[in-house]
Image (cartoon, rainbow, N blue to C red):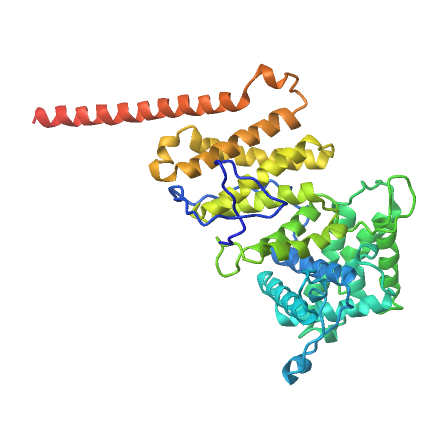
Amino acid sequence: MSSRLRDRTSCQPKLHNHHYQVTTKTAVAMPNHFTETLTCPLTELATNLSDSELRETAYEILVGACRSSGVKPLTFISHSDKNSGRAPALTSTASLQRQVSGESDSERVKKAVTIGEMLRVQMRVSEQIDSRVRRALLRVAAAQLGKRIESIVLPVEMLQQLKPSDFPNQWEYEAWQRRNLKILEAGLLLHPLLPLDKTDTAAQQLRQIIHGALEKPLETGKNNKSMQALRSIALSLACRTFDGSVSETSHWADGFPLNLRIYQMLLEACFDVNDETSVIEEVDEVLELVKKTWVVLGMNQMLHDLCFLWILFNRYVVTGQVESDLLFAANNLLMEVEKDAKAMTDPDYSKIISSTLGTILGWAEKRLLAYHNYFHSDNTETMECVVSMAVLSAKIMVEDISHEYHRTRKEIDLARERVDNYIRSSLHVAFVQASFQYFSIMSLHRMSSTR
């Protein structure tokens, strides 16, 4: 586990400058009575995009965003260059090296190339796919005269620039094309940032083009009429604004919940691909790169905190609750989410945070209402963390989200009320269990005495 993931001070861990710190102190894991699967609080997509398809799209956005904001141009490294032993040119991710004072140019390039390569591995992207993505982005950059990533509809550009000859076989090319078409459908028709007018002819035309192309591969030549129509309609839908003006930013991947699902794939790269309970040591460097996708996905710090909170908490639960650092890191982020919720006005954010905290609260209270069954003298630190998460989740849901809450904080001490309820419930459960055991023993004793 990264030594920077968790901080435990006074049993109330806090984040420092959004760095996820970890102490070397080891907590005893919560007893793993069974493996659990939690329902994802993020709304399901209205299309059948798989995790692997979302992950590949996320990687394309990441590399494109790094190229767009980098100091150096994106450079494609051919396999012949790699095999020749020549020093590789700076790649897109590498061009976004951290600006650490005192480092030489060669040191910064080496570090950036290392982080970029690690991200590729973490996201399960093969060298072949990575090479193809970078080649396509070079062509896009040339065709769009250096437009930034947020000004284009990336799937359309990728469809235009890659041909069957860029793929090992026709089947792989068609699968890749279908994935880009489904992403366009999800981002522009099913989950757009701005609601569509039911009478919008552009939306109807795009739907027809996509559905037709899903049945028969789309001809993507520059002068092909279907491709020209796809580009024109996709741009018109992506550049819509609330006031009717034309936006310089393309909105094709920033509608809920598509943006959160894509971002989830990026955050998953923070976990060691070879050890599902471990966060990589380079988590801070990786997050610096991941955050460069915000301009495309419409993300901000509040949404990032909420998504990462869920990723950490869910990973702790589904991996058997054996790595307590994940739970403490989630609690750190929950404290940040509490601050964010006070300034929250977006209805989509309100819906996601209510669902996320409801899932966390339900999991925590299942343990706290009968804590004798889950905690013992060796894992009291974990219990304190679970109590903190339960109280914080309830507090945010009641005081900062619920529109039915009108009482002042002085009228009710929510934390005291919750903890008192946990104690009373657990004592009752323990008494019932002890009574059952006592009467079972007495019954067995009477039966043996009558024989």
Q: Residue at x 61, y 58 (%)?
A: 52
Residue projecting furthest to the left: 451
Question: In the displayed structure, does residue 185 sit left or right of residue 383?
Answer: right
Task: Report x, y in % for residue 360.
Answer: 53, 36
Residue pictured at 61% horizontal, 52% vertical: 267
Residue 91 image offset from top left, x and y in percent: 71, 69
Q: Work out whether 241 lies above or below 100.
A: above
Residue placed at 86% from the left, 67% from the top? 143
- 378 sits left or right of 67 in the view: left
Q: Nearer the viewer, residue 40 or 44?
A: 40
Q: Is residue 50 visible?
A: no
Q: Position of residue 440 (x, y in %)?
A: 22, 26
Q: Quadrant of the C terminus?
A: top left
- In this view of the protein, can residue 7 be seen by the observer? yes
**Residue 344 horizontal/vertical position (percent):** 71, 33
Left or right of 116? Residue 392 is left
